[in-house]
Amino acid sequence: MDNTTEPVDDDYTDYSYVDSGSHYQFQKVNDPLTCFFVNLLYNSALFLGKIRFIPAFFGLIVNVFHLIILTRKLMRTSCINVIMIGISIADLRNLSYVLYRKWIMEREYDKCDLPDSTNYTFLMIEHWAQMTNEVTRRVSAMLGVMIALVRTLVLKYPFNSRFESLHTPGFGIKSIVFISILSSMINILYWGPSILVDGNANWFPPEECGYPKDFSAPRYQYETMEIFRIDSLVPMQMFQAAGGISKMIPAVALPILTGMLVKDIRASQKSRATLVSQRTDKSDQTTKMITLMTVTSMISEGPLGVLEFMLMFTPGSMRLL
């Protein structure tokens, strides 16, 4: 069966083509079922990418009010609430980035305008915006793990003096600072080796635009520094694996900690008297919140972590998958 196909991109011509129905065909994948699911995932990702700004907009509004409530003096008295403030700030940054990307993609371009690839400052800002977005995504997920860990330790060892500091706002601040630094270090390893260089492909304006004769503008692109390339002593795949593992940790740790937390709460409920039933209700609310965070983290971070880790073993041109 002969289908006329055109290459999607020079980087992917060894592996992927697009047919008249805008579906991907993979030369080295002969299983039709595999191709079907790949296309389903790809088209679903395209659709979700187009509409994700809608929940991001409403999430941004909700998070603003959430942050206003959490930052009140009466609310800043516990470790959990302080960590929640950190999560809220990180989520605000993440949701703002989604709206920013929507604005970038929807901007109206004139054929006479200089393209973004010729704007060195814009590309630098875009690079740092992506990098900080990765940092805050990881921080939000890891702080969720920290809340579950604190609640589990406090319930498991209620009379252990070594864990008394876990209740204090100071511990919450230290947790936010430590996780932010750790996440930034991971991203510096992953994004730091990239440098902005002349792409050796200048932009030439159409004649009718009125630019001076022989005018051209250099296009810039990011490249990995020589020392960090695949064949070097410090392969880039290791940094990619570190990023993937850091995303998988919350997706794995949160279900385990949540299970331990639920088990400890049930055990403590049996031993507590009716006088402390009100405190138990509050504990149940915290557990429900952690359970919800567990589900959302597994859905949002887990698959991305697995994908990034798998890319370590994938040839460059197959990374379209």
Image (cartoon, rainbow, N blue to C red):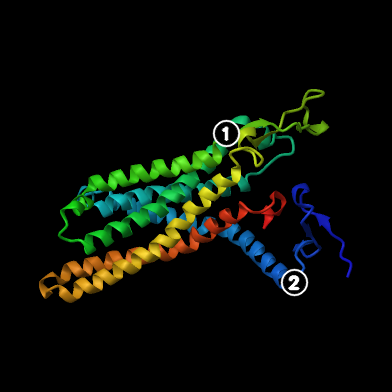
On-image quarter of the N terminus: bottom right
Name the residue at the front extreme: 233
Residue 223, percent from left and from top = 65, 36
In the displayed structure, would residue 244 be above or below residue 155?
above
Camera-nearest residue between 255 and 53: 255
Seen in the image, is 220 located left or right of residue 214? left
**Front label number (2 vs 1):** 2
As helix, strand or loop, the secondary structure at mark 1 comes to: helix
Q: Residue at x 20, y 73 (%)?
A: 269
Q: Is residue 17 visible?
A: yes
Name the residue at the right extreme: 2
Based on the displayed image, in which of its 4 quarters is residue 230 positioned?
Answer: top right
**Residue 124 - label:** 1
Q: Give me the C-alpha separation between circle 2 and circle 1.
A: 42 Å
* Sequence-first tag of 2 and 1: 2
- Amino acid beneath label 2: Pro
As helix, strand or loop, the secondary structure at mark 2 comes to: helix
Residue 37, percent from left and from top = 67, 69
In the displayed structure, would residue 312 be above or below residue 225?
below
Residue indicated by mark 2 = 32
Camera-nearest residue between 169 and 159: 159
On-image quarter of the C terminus: bottom right
Q: Is residue 98 visible?
A: no
Seen in the image, is 93 located left or right of residue 105? left
